[in-house]
Amino acid sequence: MLAVRDLHAWYGEQHVLHGVNFEVSTGEIVTLIGRNGAGRSTVLKSIMGLLHRRTGSITLEGREVLGLPSRTVARLGVGYVPEDRGIYTTLTVEENLFLPPEVRKPEFSVRQILEMFPNIRERLASGASKLSGGEQQMLAIGRVLRTGARLLLLDEPTEGLAPVIVEQIGRAVTLLKQAGLTVILVEQNFNFAAAVADRHYVIEQGHVVDMIPNAERDQHAAKLQKYLGI
Amino acid sequence: MEELLGIPVQALFGQILLGLINGSFYAILSLGLAIIFGLLNIINFTHGAQYMLGAFLAWMGLSYLGVGYWTALLIAPLLVGLTGIAIERLLLARLANVDHLYGFLLTYGIALVIQGLFRNYYGASALPYPVPAELRGGYDLGFMFLPTYRGWVVAISLAICLATWLLIEKTRLGSHLRAATEKPGLTEAFGINVPLLVTMTYGAGAALAAFAGVLAAPIYSVNPQMGADLIIVVFGVVVIGGMGSILGAIVTGFGLGLIEGLTKVFYAPASDIVIFVIMIVILLVRPAGLFGKA
């Protein structure tokens, strides 16, 4: 579904990605793991077209998307949940949920999304600034599910959340997999990643340095500990 | 003659009406400025010239083509809105990634060019524009005489302000505008065409200014300087209301018009500066403005 080839990216003059290569097949959940500052979130932003200075190639179902504006990438079916959740505090919860246009028929109806995240169903009319961190994360995921995006980019969805909320997010990600959606997950919490992912790409200093299938994670426990700095 | 607080009632209500009329123009103009500032982050100094253009287009339509007031009220905002779209696409969009001060300087320069061109061709003297036949005369309310046209200006201004507020706060398009104002990059990443929203917003802001200009033509007469004189006060209104605040622009516009009118009754020499005195106080105690977010 997605192929990233020799991807370089810069923040201003700072060269952050140095030739990233990886692939994701339809229906897979792939994580990008590594230490903070390795460039994992930058990979998601580059796919989304949020960084202006990039070289290399990003193909989505065979179509080159590197030079496209981010709105076109979104309309091709890529849904983005940023690390800070991207909740609009001047909008209500309902306005946030319905903000992105539908790009194709979604796998989940609004009713199903609200059943998945009952906390937001009860707060639709509230200002989004009043939501807790966990509720904001649920809203951020629900918002991209509503659009019918086929490829979801989730940046640190469990960061700073209580264990009970992490479990709820984990159940939601499992439902996405069952529905056949493709997910790229940037995740610091490896236990969470291991519970949902098919493969793990390890990123260090702007490169992909390893790929570990989830089924083989126990064999590579020592390597994983080194990569994650545990 | 009946008096209230030692002031003849007729004089008091006369100044309140005048204050409401000035407030109507402050509200529509500051509303346009607030919308543009919210999304483009630039202070649109061309706003006064766009207001003047609206009045001049109404005058030119009547003088050269026999186009009446009601048609001008539709056509002039449309034409000025289109020139606004061209200004945004061809000029302002190129400055999107540099300091917003450049946008301010550019719009100031455009205002000077437009005003200079009209002064060159039409001179500095005021050109009369008649009140439309349907809105001549007035009503004796017992305590004061209400000219029909002035009542119309206040009513239509309130309606336009309310409609604009509803559009921004209660519609899907409005939620896109608010989202693009808060997080433009992310809004674009959700598939919303933010550059198009920016262009249309600038065009709509310019059209609002032109609408106010047509409304003003029968009251203030038409001259190339009319926008420049008014826009300084309107900037004061926007600062007091809170930069970018839609509700702030509307409430503060009408409120300050009233305060200015009442100042004329109680201490006329202060009426020209009262808005700026309030602006200084607000900047000192609440820099984000009455309705702005710190």
Image (cartoon, rainbow, N blue to C red):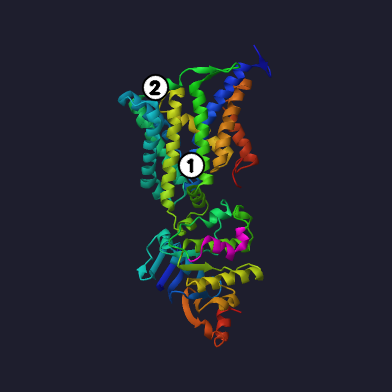
Q: Which residue is mark 2?
A: B127
Please tell me how crowded label 1 is: few (under 14), some (14-19), or many (20+) other residues with Cα within 10 Å.
many
Magenta-highlighted stretch: main secondary structure? Answer: helix
- The correct choice, above or below, for B220 with respect to B101 in the image is above
Give the quadrant of residue B214: top left
Residue A61 on image: x %, y %: 38, 70
Please tell me how crowded label 2 is: few (under 14), some (14-19), or many (20+) other residues with Cα within 10 Å.
some
- Identify the mark at residue A210; answer none if there is no mark: none
- The correct choice, above or below, for B79 with respect to A179 in the image is above
Q: Is residue B281 magenta?
A: no
Identify the residue at horizontal 41%, vertical 42% (top origin).
Answer: B203
Give the amino acid at mark 2: Leu
Mark toward the start of the polypeptide (1 vs 2): 1
Name the residue nearer the viewer: A16 or B64. B64
Q: Is residue A112 magenta?
A: yes
Which chain does tag 1 point to? B
Residue A155 on image: x %, y %: 53, 67
Q: Which residue is mark 1?
A: B43
Q: Which span of residues is magenta-colored?
A: A107-121
1 and 2 marks on the same chain: yes
Residue B257 on image: x %, y %: 56, 29
Q: Are marks 1 and 2 in contact (CB under 8 Å)?
A: no
Residue farthest to the bottom?
A219
Question: Alpha carbon of mark 1 to alpha carbon of mark 2: how far?
Answer: 29 Å
Element assignment for label 1: loop
